[in-house]
Amino acid sequence: MILEPKWKSLIATSKDPIFTSEQCRDIINMGRSQNKEIGKLIQDDGTVNKKVRTSHISWIPFDALPPMYEKLNGFIHRVNNNHFGYDGICLNETAQYTEYSEGSFYDWHMDSSFSGKEEPPVRKISMTCLLSHESEFEGGDLQLINEKTNIQLKQGHAIFFSSFLRHRVTPVTKGNRKSLVVWFGGPSFR
């Protein structure tokens, strides 16, 4: 019989904020200064499924906020070593700034397939960091695995989870939810 190490997990949350409120404001301002897109879920046949996702996104270039990327890079190595234990984790995709206004949502999805064969480098760990203050919106709950697992983040706090876990953001019922989404990848799972 083979036992997994006791420290290994699929979900980890930050005990303290990883970004201060001022840093969150800087990230929001940078995200809003980039080209805004409609968040899309492209199906296997190449069509966009509008019933699964409604949000606005932008991409923050690596050279736009080097301190943010340096902090994320250092943080992911500690999180991976302490919780996940995945091989070759690195930050190889630009961060996604996401805004959910009233009525916006992102239904159940995974950030990578379980096999990960089609995506070298494979997305292994996903991170969501709440940038807006939690009092600025209602609804917009992050749920992992099932509708009973609500993740209540506070401003600047983050959750890290295996990218193959099902998750969603429920519809925002009031206000505007702003978040930073980052994927950390590596070689294919063995």
Image (spheres, rainbow, N blue to C red):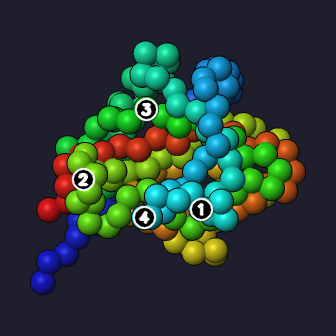
Figure quadrant of the N terminus? bottom left
Horizontal and vertical percent position of residue 125: 37, 51
Three-letter amino acid code of the residue under disc 4: Asp
CA gap, disc 2 and disc 1: 31 Å
Query: Which labelled disc corresponds to residue 94?
Result: 3
Horizontal and vertical percent position of residue 171: 75, 60
Three-letter amino acid code of the residue under disc 1: Asn
Q: Nearer the viewer, mark 4 or mark 3?
A: 4
Q: Dot 1, crowdedness within 10 Å: few (<14), some or many (≥20)?
A: few
CA gap, disc 4 and disc 2: 27 Å
State the residue position of label 4: 44
Helix, strand or loop status at disc 1 = loop
Side of 89 where 2 appears, left or right: left
Q: How many marks?
A: 4
Helix, strand or loop status at disc 3 = loop
Q: Earlier in the sequence, mark 2 or mark 3?
A: 2
Q: Earlier in the sequence, mark 4 or mark 2?
A: 4
- Name the residue at 67% across, 25% down: 32
**Depth order, front residue of 44/77:** 44
Side of 46 where 117 appears, left or right: left
